[in-house]
Amino acid sequence: MIGGASISYWVGFHILVAVLLIVDLVLLQGGTHSARLRKAWAWTIFLATLACGFALFLSKTQGREPGLEFFSGYLIEASLSVDNLFVFLLMFRSLRLDADEQRRVLLWGVLGAIVMRATFIAVGVSLLNRFAWIEYVFGTFLLVAAIRLLRHKPGGESKPGMMSWLQRRCLRGVKDQGESGVKLGMPALLFVILAVEATDLVFALDSIPAVLAITRDPFIVYTSNIFAILGLRSLYFVLAGMLDKLRLLHYGLAVILAFVALKMLLVYWVEVPVTISLAFILTVLLIFAIASKLIPEKKHS
């Protein structure tokens, strides 16, 4: 057993990831805009179904609890990634990247995110196992993240300093290539990828501790993160025209982060079953998705 699972599980999972990345790369290339959109929808649904199947597989082979923990972690990671997509959308619009360039950047972004998440998870689990007080640090960090999300406006201009600098450098690099901004040369491409990785770094600091509040099993934390990341590229193109309609979702994400923060901070006094956590996450996401549709947006004069 290594990191909560046998070597065959780790090898098999990474073979699956490699196959999915290859299929993703081939599937989403070529065709008209409507054809690409249909492919993105189909691939997003397929990956979500596959994640559910993986949760069932874990339930059958490792027990009901690991299966529920995986699905809870996957939901947290996938829902938080939607807020991540707002930043990507603004970045790509400001750089005037065409669809092919966006896919190219997101592919490298996904590959970098897999490596970065693996490192973060290994460090996070190791710290939690060695130092009990780290749990309170993570819990406090998640509460701060929840407050930040409550104050955050999707589409707003506020960004961490490093990310803002990278995005300014990206725009300058594209202008150096020409005003069309349609194709990126290597220098500009590198800075755009760095900006995407910086964005994921900021969101990983929220999402990984949130999943660690659900489970300490490295295999479950890692696989739930990677499954969500694998669907990020197709989900971006599915939601690109719908993100404005999910304008209240960040409030729901704040509630979820606050919930897992309290779960982590009160773990020695209050034990919350994973079934309750899963039900809470699903309910909050549903409520705020419906609210985004039913509550009219205020018009600013």
Image: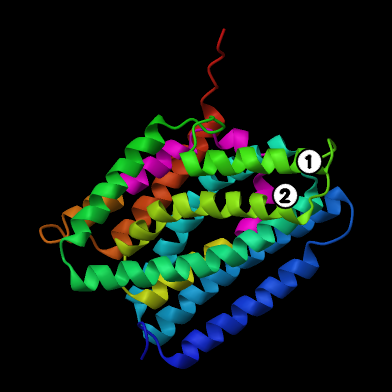
Q: How many marks?
A: 2
Residue 229 sits in which quadrant? bottom right
The amino acid type, in three-letter code, at marker 1 is: Asp
- For the C terminus, which image quadrant? top right
Colour theme: rainbow
Q: Can residue 235 be found in the magenta stretch?
A: yes
Q: Which residue is mark 1?
A: 176
The amino acid type, in three-letter code, at marker 2 is: Ala
Mark seen at residue 250:
none
* Residue 35 against residue 230 in the figure, above or below: above
Residue drawn 72% across the image and 43% down it = 173
In this view of the protein, which residue sits in the foreground, 209 or 227? 209
User: Can residue 77 be seen in this snapshot?
Assistant: yes
Q: Is disc 2 placed on a helix, strand or loop?
A: helix
Residue drawn 72% across the image and 68% down it = 24
The main secondary structure of the magenta stretch is: helix
The earlier-in-sequence mark between 2 and 1 is 1
State the CA–CA distance, disc 2 to disc 1: 8 Å
Q: Which residues are magenta?
A: 230-258
Mark seen at residue 188:
2
* Residue 28 against residue 54 in the figure, above or below: above
Q: Is disc 1 placed on a helix, strand or loop?
A: helix
Residue drawn 83% across the image and 35% down it = 179
Q: Residue furthest left?
A: 269
Q: Position of residue 10 (x, y in %)?
A: 48, 85
Q: Position of residue 222 (x, y in %)?
A: 44, 71
User: Can residue 37 be seen in this snapshot?
Assistant: no
Residue drawn 42% across the image and 84% down it = 60
* Residue 223 against residue 244 in the figure, above or below: below
Q: Are marks 2 and 1 in contact (CB under 8 Å)?
A: yes
Residue 48 horizontal side relative to residue 276, left or right: right
In this view of the protein, which residue sits in the foreground, 71 or 13? 13
